[in-house]
Structures are given as C-alpha cells and as structure tokens.
Amino acid sequence: MILNLPNNTTLDLTKPNLAAIINLTPDSFSDGGRLNSTQSALEHTLDAIHQGADIVDVGGESTRPGASRISPDQQIKRTIPFITELAQKNQTPISIDTTRLTVARAALNAGATIINDISAGEDSNNDTLRLAADTNTPIILMHKKGAPQNMQQHPTYGDVTHEVLNYLMDRAQTAQSLGVPQSNIIIDPGFGFGKTHQHNLTLLANLHQFTATPYPVLFGASRKSTLGHITQTPSPTDRDYATAATTALAVAAGVQIIRVHNIPPNRHAADVTRAVLQHQTQHENNEIHNPT
C-alpha cells in the first residue's frame, strides 16, 4: 500500500512508519517550550529524520488534557516558518496537526503534505475534509471524546472499541462523501483522548480490529499518562521504554504509522517486530509449500 502525497512523493505503508512529534508549543505535556525557535526545531527534526523518522508531525496547539485553545493566527505564527524551512531542506512528509481550516491551508501552501485532524473534521464543520478533497491530500481522522479542556472528566463507554471504531467509520464515510478518496484516509483511535487507563489498554489490545478496516491506522501512545500509570514514572520523558513496548504491539497488530517523541528506541522496536513478523510469514509459507 502506497500513500501518494501532493508534492509527488510517496509514503510506503507496507512497512511501519514513525511520525516524529514536533511540538512548537510552550505547554505540551512532554516537551512544551523545548523547541522555542525555528532553528532549534529544525535541528531537532533533521536529527529525528536521520534517526529514522518517516514523517514529521508539526503542531502549534497543545491538545494535552486541560489545554486551552489557541487562535489560528497564533498556530500559523508558530508553525508556518518552520514548515517552510523544513520543506525547502528535506522531502520527508510533513503532517500538520490542527483542527483549524486556515492553519491546515497555510501549512499545505508552505509544504505540508498530510492533514492530522484530531477532531476528524468536526471542529471545522467538515471544512478540513473538504480541503483534503480539493487538494487531494491525505487526512488523519482521530477519535476523541469531548475537548482537551474536559475530555478526561469521567469519560464513559459501553464498549470502547466498538464505539470508537463505529465513530471512525462514520467520519471516514463522511470524508468520502465530500470527495476524499478512501486511499487518502487514515484513522486513529485516539489513545488518551477522552479515555481512562482501562479504555486505553482495551484499545491497544484491540488494534487488530482497526487494522482490519480498509483504512491505514495511526497510533500514538508516546509518553502518555497510561504508560506512566503502569510503569510508575511521573515524568513523561522517562516513558520512552514503555512507549517502545506499545510501538512493538502496534506493529504486531498491523499499524502502519506510529506517532512518537523519541525516534531511536521506537525505530528499533518497530524494525525488530517487523523482522519477526516477516520471518514468521516466510516460515508459514515454507510449511505450506514444503509440508513434512
């Protein structure tokens, strides 16, 4: 499966791809304020690409629990100079993490090639879906329950996997009805977005149900509080080992894109898991063709 991008490049979805999280925000839960200039963000990003990042996911608004909304103008001010510089220096696909139409459009004009909308188009009244259709741009549709300001206030589900999957299928169908090709739609179950620790573990255990759909899947558990709860690590930056474990599980379930903060441990986890799966498939094929 190959994802065609607007700048005549492609992304190979037959292998696990890592999306490097680039937060150009002062208040993100893990690394807020760390990348406080275009130059520092560019150096960090080029290092991540050298370490094995396949996508660069750029955001100018924190979506951590309790975060306040940021205006489109402020998001543009934070992200567009960086995207412009990066696109001129490197052909690695850039996704813009935003729910705002004007931000998404400005990012595409600056060189971004994927839209990552955590509201699955709802915050813009489907306008980001229409933009994706008009520009033939791949779009990531994520599930969240509520808004970042309130999403962790007692989220409840009857069957979290069923409800999240049904929501994503509905939003994907809406995108297609507005002209987005099925091949340009990626779904994301939204680990940590309006879910308890138990909900998150259920979704992680059931990722195969998402990868069984016609749509590629993005998964992002990097450094999130559920991992801290399990491993008793209060600091998000101490959760990279736990994150790598979720990367291995995601790859084993067939997830095509994993969104992470720290590339090297997750690159290793993804590549080892893929090698084991390929070996297993080869062994099974040999058994079929050469039965004992």
Image: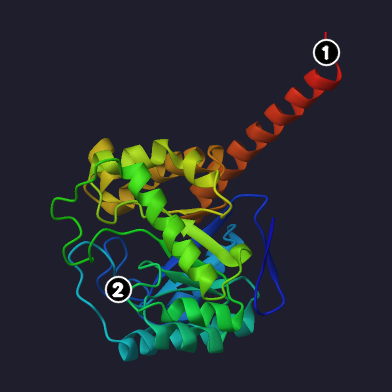
> Which residue, given by chain and number where applicable, does mark 2 sit on?
33
Amino acid, disc 2: Gly
Instruction: Please tell me whether mark 1 sits on a helix, a strand or a loop.
Output: loop
Residue 93 seen in render: yes
Left or right? Give the position of 242 relative to 196. right
Using a 10 Å C-alpha cutoff, classify the residue at mark 2 as few (fewer than 14 neighbours), some (14 to 19) or many (20 or more): few
| Image height of 46 relative to 152, above or below | below
Residue 143 spot, x, y in % from top left: 36, 58
Lower position in the chain sequence, tag 1 or tag 2: 2
Amino acid, disc 1: Pro
Using a 10 Å C-alpha cutoff, classify the residue at mark 1 as few (fewer than 14 neighbours), some (14 to 19) or many (20 or more): few
The quarter of the picture where residue 257 lies is bottom right
Q: Residue at x 26, y 62 (%)?
A: 29
Q: Residue at x 31, y 88 (%)?
A: 74
Residue 260 seen in render: no
Q: Quadrant of the C terminus?
A: top right
Left or right? Give the position of 116 relative to 190. right
> Which residue, given by chain and number where applicable, does mark 1 sit on?
291
Numbered-mark total: 2
In front here: 211 or 21? 211
In front here: 90 or 254? 254
- Tell me the CA gap for discs 1 and 2: 59 Å
The quarter of the picture where residue 22 lies is bottom left
